[in-house]
Image (spheres, rainbow, N blue to C red):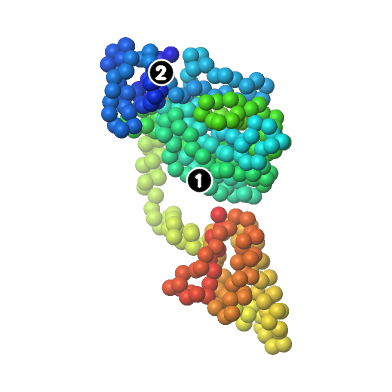
Amino acid sequence: MKLRIGDKVRFLNETGEGTITRFKDKNYAFVEMPDGFEIPYFIKELVPIHTELIISSEADNLDLNPESGIADAVYFVIEPDHELPVLVSDYSIYLFNSSSYNLMYAYSIKDDAYFQTLKHGEVGAYQKILLKQVKIEFFKEYPYQKIECILFKNTHYRAQIPIAETVFVNPSNLNQYQLIKHHEFKRPVYAFMLKDEFIVAQNIEQELSNEDIQRLKTIKEFKSHIRESKSHKEQLKKLEKEIDLHIEELVDDVAGLSSHEMLSIQLERVEKELDKALNAGMKKLVFIHGVGNGRLKMEIQKILKSTKGVTFQDASYKDYGFGATQVNIL
C-alpha cells in the first residue's frame, strides 16, 4: 500500500504514532511525533491508521483489511453502547473523518421547518469527534441529521466540493442496517457515508467567459436611483417585533377584570404573537411585561420552555430595564 504525505501512522515494532511529513527515499519516511520531533522510519515498519469503513445493509460484519486499498471518505457514525439491541441504552453520534483533509463542520438537526445547529468546529485528518450522546427517543423526535463540511489542508491541496448531506435516522430504519466492526470504535457501529469521491486530477475552478464579464459590467452600471437595495439592518428589523403586554394596551377597559382574567388575556396574546412569528419566519420578539410581582414573566417563560425552536433571555437592560423578555427564533 502506498503511503502519502499527511498520512497518520502507527509503528509496527514499537508503541507510538505520528504523521508522515516527507520521504527520504523509497525505503524511509520522516514521521513527525506528537512532541514535534521528526524521525526517519523504515516504511515497511509503518502501519496506516486510516482504513476504509463500509456500510451496507446486506453485508456481514467486516474485518477490514488495509492492504485491500485505501479510499478517503467521511462518515456519519452511530455507536450503540451495547452489542445486543435489547440492551442498548445510549447512542453516541460521531463525525468520522477518514480522509487526509481537515474539516470545518456544522452538525444540525431538523426541528419542524427549521434546522438547529447543535455543534460546530474542526476535525483533523483521520480523526473522529463525538457530536452528541442520545437516547433512542432522540431519533424519534429528530430523524433528520444534517452535516455540512468544508475540506482543506494546511499545505498545498486540491480544492474539494463541500459536504452538505442530510441523513434520515429513526429507530425502525436504524435496525435495518448491519452493524460494522471498526478498530476506531469500541463496539460495532452504524455508518453512513457522507463523501467518498475526492478530486485528484480535475480542476473545479471556473474561468469567467467574455459573456460573464460583459454581464458583470452591465450589473455594475445599474444606477442607484433605479434599483436601490435596502441595508441588511433594515431587513433584519422587519424580522423583529416588540409586544407591549401591559393590560391597558390590550383591552379598552380594565374595570371589573380580576387579576386572573388580566393574566389570561396577556398570556393569550403571548401565544398568539408567538405562533404568528414562527409561521412568518420572524427572528426576534420582545415581550414587554414590566416588573410587578414577576408572575407574568414566570408564566411567559413556561410557555417558551415548551415551545420548540426558540430560546429566550432577559431583554436589553438599557432599553427595557428588568421588564422585558427577548425571544430568539432559531
Give the residue number, with chain letter if any, for mark 1.
119
- Amino acid on which the number 1 mark rests in the picture: Lys
- Left or right, 263 with respect to 4, comes to right
Q: How many numbered marks have been drawn onto this rendered protein structure? A: 2
State the SS at label 2: loop
- The residue sitting at 37% across, 32% down in the picture is 153
> In the displayed structure, would residue 296 be above or below residue 63?
below
Q: Position of residue 179 (x, y in %)?
A: 63, 27
Image quadrant where one finds the N terminus: top left
Q: Position of residue 68 (x, y in %)?
A: 51, 14
Q: Tell which of 145 and 274 is nearer to you.
A: 145
- The residue sitting at 54% across, 69% down in the picture is 325
In the image, farthest residue toward the front: 14
- Left or right, 116 with respect to 32, comes to right
Measure the C-alpha gap from mark 2 to mark 1: 36 Å
Are circles 2 and 1 on residues that touch, CB within 8 Å? no
- The residue sitting at 51% across, 22% down in the picture is 52
- Is residue 198 visible in the rendered structure shown here? no
In the image, farthest residue toward the bottom: 255
Residue density around tag 2, few if under 14, some if 14–19, many if 20 or more, within 10 Å = some
Q: Tell which of 156 and 50 is nearer to you.
A: 50
State the SS at label 1: strand
Residue density around tag 1, few if under 14, some if 14–19, many if 20 or more, within 10 Å = few
Image quadrant where one finds the C terminus: bottom right
- Is residue 32 visible in the rendered structure shown here? yes
Q: Position of residue 57 (x, y in %)?
A: 66, 25
> In the displayed structure, would residue 65 be above or below residue 267?
above
- Amino acid on which the number 2 mark rests in the picture: Leu
Labels 2 and 1: the sequence-earlier one: 2
- Left or right, 165 with respect to 83, comes to left
Give the residue number, with chain letter if any, for mark 2.
12
Tell me which corner region of the image, top left, top right, bottom left or bottom right, holds residue 18: top left
